[in-house]
Each structure stands twice: as structure tokens, then as C-alpha cells.
């Protein structure tokens, strides 16, 4: 089949090319709209690195990341906020390479709960670094805010993706119908 033949088939079945992608997009929009959303919030903690002790300070920052991801921090969050189901949240503290910051991402069904836990964990890391490790200059440089959280899944994104998929399905259906009829234009 040449490109000219394919374009002739598409032109002859234009209604199918329009209807199938719209149906796919509307179906995906409806399904994704009723799926519960997950919100992601982020807090950032600065752990200053001294020039004299750069390697040790970077190792300490990596250790603080492990502390934030550990069971002691988890237990502290549960005890400080018994009203929030911390086990339902996805909490991840990371340290970008060669960086002086710890980034705390919290994902959950409630923007407010995720923000509270992200900020509480950032405070916990600061307290731990200041009081237990005697590290000076530790500070929270960005707090999680429920207003700035991103949500997934995005109905518009999925509608566009499924519309494209619907377009491909429509083209395949047209080609198969033409081959069965033996009417290659």
C-alpha cells in the first residue's frame, strides 16, 4: 500500500478517524477523573559543607538521608502526628550528588497531610543534625506547601495520549477493512 492509497482510505473514512480518537479520549478522561489523585510535595534542607571537612560533611549528609528514610524517623513522625496515617504516604529523602541539600518528597492522597509530614521530617533532620551531630548552619530552605503540590494522574495528559492511540487504532481498522474488502484504492 502506498502513501497515496493510505491517504485516500483515510479521506474515505474520515468519520471513523474522528470518532474513534474522541471516544478513546473521553473514555480515558472519564476513567482517570474518578481515580484517586496522589499529590507530591517537597521540602529541602541545607546541610552546609565546610571546605576543610568536605568529604566528612558530604558523608554526614548522606547519613542524614539514610536517617530520614529510616524507621526511627518514621516512628518519630507517627508519634508527632498520630492523626495522620504515615504508612499511607510514600516518603523519600534524597541527596543529589555533590550537593549540600537533602530533598524530601512525600506522596499521598491528601495535600495537607503530605505537606505536614514533609515539613515535619525536614524539622526532624534539622534537629538531628543540630543536636545529635553538632552541625551548625543547618536550615530548611524550602517548606512543602499544599498549594504547590502536583497531582497525578492528569486527566488531560491521558486524554491526549488515548486520543493518539485511538487515531492509530482507527487507521489500523481502516486498513484491515480495506484489505478484507479487497478495495485498495
Image: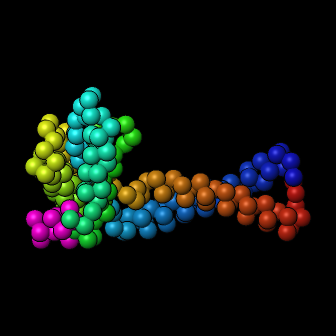
Who is closer to the viewer here, 171 or 108? 108
Q: Which segment is the magenta one?
A: 73-85
**Residue found 51% across the figure and 53% down from its top:** 160
**Residue found 27% across the figure and 46% down from its top:** 60
How far across and how far down the image is residue 47, in percent?
A: 22, 40
How far across and how far down the image is residue 39, in percent?
A: 30, 57
In the figure, 32 relative to 148: above or below? below
Tell me if 167 is positioned left or right of 93 in this view: right
Residue at the top extreme of this rendering: 51
Tell me if 110 is positioned left or right of 82 in this view: right
The answer, for residue 108, to whether it is visible in the render is no
Tell me if 65 is positioned left or right of 85 in this view: right
Who is closer to the viewer here, 155 or 13? 155
How far across and how far down the image is residue 62, in percent?
A: 31, 48
- Does residue 86 belong to the magenta stretch? no
In the figure, 99 relative to 128: above or below? above
Amino acid at each position: 500500500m502506498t502513501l497515496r492509497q493510505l491517504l485516500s482510505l483515510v479521506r474515505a473514512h474520515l468519520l471513523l478517524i474522528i470518532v474513534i480518537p474522541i471516544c478513546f479520549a473521553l473514555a480515558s478522561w472519564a476513567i482517570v477523573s474518578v481515580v484517586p489523585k496522589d499529590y507530591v510535595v517537597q521540602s529541602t534542607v541545607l546541610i552546609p559543607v565546610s571546605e576543610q571537612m568536605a568529604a566528612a560533611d558530604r558523608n554526614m549528609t548522606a547519613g542524614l538521608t539514610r536517617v530520614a528514610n529510616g524507621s526511627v524517623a518514621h516512628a518519630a513522625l507517627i508519634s508527632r502526628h498520630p492523626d495522620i496515617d504515615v504508612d499511607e504516604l510514600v516518603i523519600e529523602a534524597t541527596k543529589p550528588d555533590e550537593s549540600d541539600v537533602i530533598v524530601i518528597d512525600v506522596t499521598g492522597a491528601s495535600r495537607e497531610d503530605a505537606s505536614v509530614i514533609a515539613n515535619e521530617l525536614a524539622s526532624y533532620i534539622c534537629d538531628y543534625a543540630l543536636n545529635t551531630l553538632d552541625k551548625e548552619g543547618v536550615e530548611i530552605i524550602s517548606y512543602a506547601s499544599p498549594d504547590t503540590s502536583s497531582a497525578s494522574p492528569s486527566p488531560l495528559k491521558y486524554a491526549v495520549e488515548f486520543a493518539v492511540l485511538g487515531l492509530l487504532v482507527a487507521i489500523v481498522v481502516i486498513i484491515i477493512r480495506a484489505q478484507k474488502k479487497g478495495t485498495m484504492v
